[in-house]
Image (cartoon, rainbow, N blue to C red):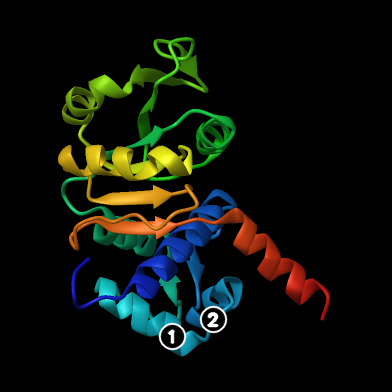
């Protein structure tokens, strides 16, 4: 990730893009910074700093033009080489992700999934063809896969992560309950549903 922009800023920009997309579908054309910030659960000052990083400026009288701002954020996030993503491990979590992403309006497209189960290889799961892990390198090149969602058991997660890195994958969303050891230039987002549920449950009791 570039040094000049933080992981948290990227996360907020992704959130703004999603909100702007929903507003555009609803027919809204412009929005003031404080209105967009309120929808995102942030301050207007923070939102304006984030939007300035994108290089987009609104009007003092009309606010932000939604289509223009959404486009600017998308270009900033995606760059010139958009690439695609893949799901590795088509068990319960992997299938749920494929089902969910099939309904999402995301700019990141999942173009392939991988598994070791012969019964799954060659099948189409929620619109996504499943390939053998042995084809990982070839398919990553074929589909220009740049990131992956890792949904395999903990015992094989590190090995599979190393295979992904060898295929020039530089971003991994990790659902396996272990800390992956990867090079510094590979970004890993660890998703631990049990920890998240414990946190939610803690605050629910307050």
| Position above or below: 74 against 132 | below
Q: Nearer the viewer, residue 91 or 1?
A: 91
Residue tagged 1: 46
Callout 1 environment at 10 Å: few (<14), some (14 to 19), or many (20+)? Answer: some
Q: Position of residue 108 (x, y in %)?
A: 36, 43
Question: Does residue 83 show up?
Answer: no
Q: Label 2's element?
A: loop
Which residue is rendered at x = 50% and y = 55% of the image? 191
Q: Quadrant of residue 186?
A: bottom left
Q: Nearer the viewer, residue 153 or 50?
A: 153
Q: Quadrant of residue 71?
A: bottom left
Q: Position of residue 190 (x, y in %)?
A: 44, 58
| Position above or below: 150 against 200 | above
Residue extending furthest right? 205
Cα distance between the residues tagged 1 and 2: 7 Å
Callout 2 environment at 10 Å: few (<14), some (14 to 19), or many (20+)? Answer: some
Instruction: Tell me, for residue 42, which label it has, or none.
Output: 2
The number of numbered badges drawn on the structure is 2
Q: Position of residue 90 (x, y in %)?
A: 49, 28
Tags 1 and 2 in contact by the CB under 8 Å rule?
Answer: yes
């Amino acid at each position: 990730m570039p040094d000049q922009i933080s992981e948290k800023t990227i996360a907020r920009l992704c959130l703004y893009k999603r909100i702007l997309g929903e507003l555009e579908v609803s027919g809204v054309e412009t929005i003031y910074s404080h209105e967009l910030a309120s929808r995102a659960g942030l301050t207007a000052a923070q939102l304006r700093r984030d939007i300035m990083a994108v290089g987009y400026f609104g009007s003092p009288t009309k606010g932000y033009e939604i289509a223009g701002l959404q486009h600017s954020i998308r270009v900033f996030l995606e760059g010139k080489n958009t690439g695609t993503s893949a799901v590795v491990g088509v068990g319960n979590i992997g299938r749920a992700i494929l089902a969910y992403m099939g309904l999402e309006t995301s700019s990141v497209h999942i173009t392939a999934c991988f598994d070791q189960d012969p019964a799954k290889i060659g099948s189409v799961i929620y619109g996504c063809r499943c390939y053998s892990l042995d084809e990982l390198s070839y398919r990553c090149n074929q589909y220009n896969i740049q990131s992956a969602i890792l949904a395999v058991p903990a015992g094989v997660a590190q090995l599979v992560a190393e295979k992904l890195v060898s295929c020039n994958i530089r971003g991994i969303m990790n659902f396996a309950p272990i800390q992956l050891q990867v090079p510094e230039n590979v970004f890993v987002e660890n998703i631990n549903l049990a920890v998240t549920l414990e946190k939610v449950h803690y605050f629910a009791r307050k």
